[in-house]
Amino acid sequence: MLGRRSAVIASLTTGALALAALVPSAAATADPANDRHAPPPKAPTAVGYGGAVASVDAEASRVGLEVLRKGGNATDAAVATAAALGVTEPYSAGLGGGGFFVHYSARTGEVETIDGREKAPSAMPHDAFIDPETGEEYPFFPDMVTSGASVGVPGTPLTWHNALKKWGTKSLRQTLAPAARLARRGFVVDETFHQQTVDNAERFAAIDSTAELFLPGGSAPEVGSRFRNPDVAATYDMIGHQGVGAFYHGRLAGEIADAVTSPPKTGETDLPVPAGWVTTDDLAAYTAPEREPTRSTYRGLDVVGMAPPSSGGTSVGEALNILERYELDAMSPTEAYHHLIEASAISFADRGAYVGDADQVDVPVDALLDDTFAAERACGIDPAAAQPKPVAAGDVDDYDGVCDGEAGAGETARDTENLETTNLTVVDRWGDVVEYTLTIEQTGGSGITVPGRGFLLNNELTDFSTTYRADDPNRIEPNKRPRSSMSPTIVLGEGPDGEKQPILAVGSPGGSTIITTVLQILVERLARDRSLPEAMAAPRVSQRNVAKTDAEPAFIDAYAGPLESLGHSFASTAEIGAATAIGIGPDGLLTATAEPWRRGGGSALVVRPAG
Ligand code: GLU
């Protein structure tokens, strides 16, 4: 017999159960043949000039391209695209989440970043994820994530405001308007959105406001139907007209705090949905600061990434520093992937030991990105045999680059990061670049929609180590930002006059696999000399300092045999990452790329297609 929860899911899936509290359907069936708003066609690669946008979604990329066409710059287009993703990818990103915005200015030659990571409330206790009834941690999914306790103070609205103020030419009102129109007009439900809703139906049904919006009529919107969200349109309008203060202060702030501290739970659910701690004071106190980016070099190129609280910049940079010591281009695929896997395990060992929110813990960023440290860490790599994993972390206080000791065994870190989120890349006609990864963490975040406001709140606080340990850099603390893996990265090379100029921007969703996806794309492109579309399409492998390396089936088919004879072992995983990237040629030729098939395929557009 089905358990009660499974029975609810089954009936929601088939649409057989009409939940009494639900309002009539927000998703009306669309007839694609007569639909002047049918979804735009999507292509994963576009080559041309004058600006480019790449995202996972055709509607969102189109919104960004329109902004570029009408004279907006990369920041204007990035904010507009992100807001549109909040409509069409509401389970991955939106007003209720956070992210990291990385910007290159062609005028100043500088890469600067905004940290829009969610922050723990000031009353966050160390035992936030312990069930008082059992004294044990809540089961991770769906119990722990579906909670007010997991909600951090959102950073996305202030990221948009700050980015526009610093680099944009358009107002928040102008950049949110296309997304508001899209939300009113609706988008055509595809298989991915439908399936994500089905997969989360039990927990969405546990929250009145979420069931009302995302389970119209009691079931997931059908593929091909039109999904409208007038509530989020009104919220975008309000923030557009009144400014970002309308989110962090006043009535909406009060409603967010209420939804966290007293989640609008249905009477019908078995899920605990514990309350959280975000107050209006926490919202009012939130800042999205600029952070000095991480910088490392790879074969004469500058690799610029996101600093703590993200572990993206240090982890990608450290692994590249290790790999720079080898001629990957002269190696067989087996040898090259062996080194990639080993370097990745090492950088994850150091990430676990040292990286957290640098506002609260001492993160040795310089050591982690030091070539001498990389030289010493590379000592663990045997070209003929895989290291036993997990490998131990290095000693950031005592290293000289000399191989003289036995590395001990490490410990496996618990990995609770989800595999969703979204990423976008924009280049404008002036040569400015934005690489922006944004998230609400779990697919569907905390499952809590702010009633009447049309957006889900994040569950980003489950990115903390959920069990408290005083020596853990990612331990839960009040007013702290949980460690992220988001890795928006811009690579700069040398221009014709010796000046640095961007050649590639890349980022991906995928929880902790973000780091390995970005690393692998960089390695395929910069070391293995693949074209950018080939680098994006290459079967992915993800080693995160655990015994078995995750790999896509195509990777396993092509490479696992010889790698296993070196001592590697693999776990098959259907897909890893959903990246976007733009390559910038010396003559300004843009190669915009999104996923060819992962997450249903993405959408790359250029202002003036070549040829
Ligand atoms: N919460 C994750 C992070 O900050 C991202 C989640 C995801 O990619 O799905 O690294």
Image (cartoon, grey):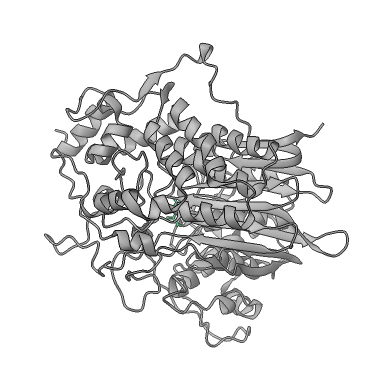
Looking at the image, the residue that sits furthest to the front is 242
Residue 539 sits in quarter:
top right
How far across and down, in percent of the image, does residue 137 sit? 22, 61
Assign the N terminus to one quadrant of the image: top left
- 521 displayed left or right of 153: right
How far across and down, in percent of the image, does residue 352 sit? 44, 70
Q: Nearer the viewer, residue 140 or 249?
A: 249
Q: Nearer the viewer, residue 321 or 471?
A: 471
Assign the C terminus to one quadrant of the image: top right
Q: Is residue 293 above or below residue 243?
A: below
Looking at the image, the residue that sits furthest to the left is 133
> Which image quarter has ligand 1?
bottom left
Decide if residue 293 is in sight here. Answer: yes
Residue located at (75% from left, 45% from top): 429
Looking at the image, the residue that sits furthest to the top is 34
- 286 displayed left or right of 135: right
Q: Is residue 395 above or below residue 343?
A: below
Looking at the rendered structure, the number of numbered marks drawn on it comes to 0
Decide if residue 93 is in sight here. Answer: no
- 563 displayed left or right of 450: right
How far across and down, in percent of the image, does residue 283 sit? 36, 59
Residue located at (39% from left, 55% from top): 248
Q: Nearer the viewer, residue 235 or 498?
A: 235
How far across and down, in percent of the image, does residue 177 sit? 52, 37
Residue located at (55% from left, 17% from top): 36
